[in-house]
Amino acid sequence: MEKVVFKRPKYIKKVPFHYCPGCGHSIIHRLIAEVIEELDIGEKTICVPPAGCAVLAYDYFDIDMGEAPHGRGAALATGVKRILPDKMVFSYQGDGDIAAIGTAETIHAANRGENITVIFVNNSCYGMTGGQMAPTTLLGQNSTTTPGGRDKDRDGSPIDLSEMLAITKGAVYIERTAVNSIKNIIKTKKAIAKAFKVQMAGLGFSLVEILSPCPTNWKMSPVDACEWIDDGVMQTFPLKIVKDETS
Amino acid sequence: MILVDGMMSQMMEPVIFPDPVNLTELPPKPWVLDGANGRPSRIIKSLILGTVEMEEHNWKLARKYETISREIANAETYMTEDARFVVVAYGTAARVAKGSIKRAREMGLKVGLLRPVTLWPFPERVIREMSRSVKDFLVFEMNTGQMLDDVKLSLEGRSNVHFYGRPGGIVSTPDEIAKVISSLYYRQHLEED
């Protein structure tokens, strides 16, 4: 007798993803969909997708999706959650979206302690537009706008948004994880589930920052990109629970 | 979009509110995102990536704009019935123009005001119809001529279009505009029968 051990999550539509080979979005989409299914919240969850590669998340998740203007995910999620406080509301945002264009909205949403969850996918560049420097780009990292590497004096240093948000009074749970290994993928899923539970318990603002490979713009193989997260990205953005005031 | 100028935001005067609208009877919201409970999931988005889909959407918007421009273009007229000279002005400039028209009327000049209430869609039909009896229009703006082309395009050469405007800084007074009106009025020999 056949036993199903691996299948498409219930809340992912049966359409092919457009993401590049080795991209982290596909994994993160799956993890979120699995958590939604396991918590049995698919019929009460609203997702706010970003501007960027993951805007097409609205074609992939089989839940209600409301696209935000660039960077304004937390602001839009705030509006949805305040009107419908019993629903689950999360924004899904990249680093260019959340740490550059939407920094102000994000900081104030966290500071107000909005009871929303933010999934912050950090691939340390602007992916969709072709690999330009983002605020999160590492020192020395090549990008189309920092040929020869990001220079501290010329371009400034990478910004650690999660640490910035952690000092706000309203942020309750912030964790940085990665999806570059089986171990880290499992930890990421746990963090997403915890963030959602924080919202379900009405505790306040929760955010999971996920270090994610971008082999296309990093100009690496998918395997090398995963290794680079360990050897490079984590040196600037170490995995850790940045803030946890849930207990 | 409601276009206002800084002067308007600093003015105070009594207003009469219209009767309140009954908000208990709102139209249904078949688009609302409140969780896909017992119905298919919904998407609200502004992004259209497919070329065919995008062109269809743009045609839909074009038809919508056409309907809007037909239905909501609106202008207020003031003392235009017997006017030989009409000032076209909006916003604060229109209020200044009203004062200047009162002064011009006291001097015996047949002057009226046309105030576009909507700048887009521009009330071109009202202006064009007015050009049957009015051969001189003065566009007066608190800038260097943002509405001037709209007036010229509406008139299609049927009447003379004069312009007076000052950029932000000093606000024109009714006396100042009355002088502009009277000098143009006599220059165009409008006092003659």
Image (cartoon, coloured by chain):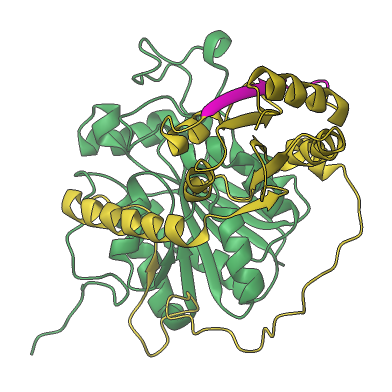
In the image, residue B151 sits, relative to residue A177, either above or below, namely: above
Q: Residue at x 9, y 85 (%)?
A: A2
Q: Give residue B168's quadrant in the image.
A: top right
Q: Colour of chain B?
A: yellow
Q: Magenta residues?
A: B160-170
As rendered, which of B166 and B137 lies closer to the eye?
B137
In the image, residue A160 sits, relative to residue A88, either above or below, namely: above
Please state if A7 lies on the left or on the right of B124 as rendered. left
The number of discs equals: 0
Q: Is residue A67 visible?
A: no
Please state if A63 lies on the left or on the right of B188 as rendered. left
As rendered, which of B114 and B24 lies closer to the eye?
B114
Furthest residue to the left?
A: A1
Does A93 appear in magenta?
no
Q: x, y (%) of residue A14?
A: 19, 70
Q: Quadrant of the C terminus of chain B?
A: top right
Q: Give residue A162's quadrant in the image.
A: top right
Q: Residue at x 54, y 68 (%)?
A: A89
Q: x, y (%) of residue B151?
A: 52, 35
| Chain identifier, green in the render | A
Q: x, y (%) of residue B71?
A: 47, 62
As rendered, which of A38 and B187 lies closer to the eye?
B187
Q: Residue at x 33, y 28 (%)?
A: A131
Does B166 appear in magenta?
yes
Please state if B168 lies on the left or on the right of A138 as rendered. right
Q: x, y (%) of residue B20?
A: 76, 79
Q: Is residue A144 visible?
A: yes
